[in-house]
Image (spheres, rainbow, N blue to C red):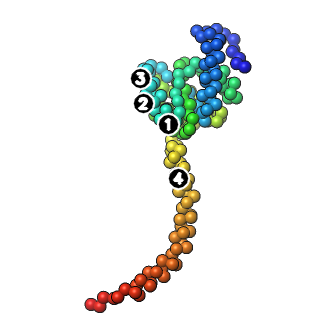
Amino acid sequence: RIIFYGKEDRNLAFTKKQKEAMVAKYEGWLEKSQAMFVMSYTGLSNKEVETIRRAMRESGGEAHVVKNTLVKIAMINQGYEIDEVMTETSLTGFAYTDPAATAKVMADAAKEHGEKLQFKLGFLDKAELSADEIKALAKLPPLPVMRAQILGTILAPASKLVRVINEPGSQVARVLKAYSEPKDEE
């Protein structure tokens, strides 16, 4: 059941059915996402927003311009605890596969567009993040790089063990080879 709050419901130029459909769509995005990042934007052209959306899709996420009151309702319905009043126009990024990569795309866009695009807040597994925490998340390496680093750390002791075990056999082989080769007498 979707609950609309007071006057906010009357200020929108959408019918109740349209609002319910939008809230349901927002709830679907929230269910699929591992993280969500909300930015305020002003003065960006459609082309600039589309460039950000394209980069977000490449990082395994999506970016959407959302209706603040309706996305807040969807968040509450999905169990998010949100106290902040969301104002201004919001560009929201949903991270479906790699939150760090999605945060990086949005942080890079914020650097590129300066004052036109600023982080409001974010959520990682329903835990609220500040703008600084989102920027710190953006500095993490992408998921495939982190997996490779962890795998390298795990495999390093095993490869050292194999070298230690093989070393006595290779020493014997080198000694036998040295005795079997004829010596040059000069």
The answer to whether residue 96 is above or below residue 4 is below
- Residue 39 can be seen in this image: no
CB-based contact (under 8 Å), mark 3 and mark 4: no
Q: Quadrant of residue 162?
A: bottom right
- Residue 28 can be seen in this image: yes
CB-based contact (under 8 Å), mark 1 and mark 2: no
Disc 4 is placed on an element classified as helix
Task: Identify which residue is drawn at 60% across, 33% down.
Answer: 33
Relative horizontal placement of residue 2, taking residue 102 as reference (left or right): right
Kindly report the distance in space between the C-alpha atoms of the residues bearing marks 3 and 1.
Answer: 19 Å
Kindly report the distance in space between the C-alpha atoms of the residues bearing marks 4 and 2.
Answer: 30 Å
- Residue type, label 4: Gln
- Residue type, label 1: Ser
Extreme right residue here? 1
Sequence-first disc among 4 and 1 = 1
Q: Quadrant of residue 84?
A: top right
The number of callouts visible is 4
Q: Please state which of residues 34 and 32 is positioned toward the viewer in this rendering.
A: 32
Q: Nearer the viewer, mark 1 or mark 2?
A: 1
Query: Circle 1 sits on which residue?
Result: 59
Query: Circle 3 sits on which residue?
Result: 47
Quarter placement of the C terminus: bottom left
Query: Circle 2 sits on which residue?
Result: 112
CB-based contact (under 8 Å), mark 4 and mark 2: no
Q: Please state which of residues 119 and 5 is positioned toward the viewer in this rendering.
A: 5
Query: Circle 4 sits on which residue?
Result: 149
Disc 1 is placed on an element classified as loop
- Residue type, label 2: Glu
Sequence-first disc among 3 and 1 = 3
Kindly report the distance in space between the C-alpha atoms of the residues bearing marks 1 and 2.
Answer: 17 Å
Q: Nearer the viewer, mark 4 or mark 2?
A: 4
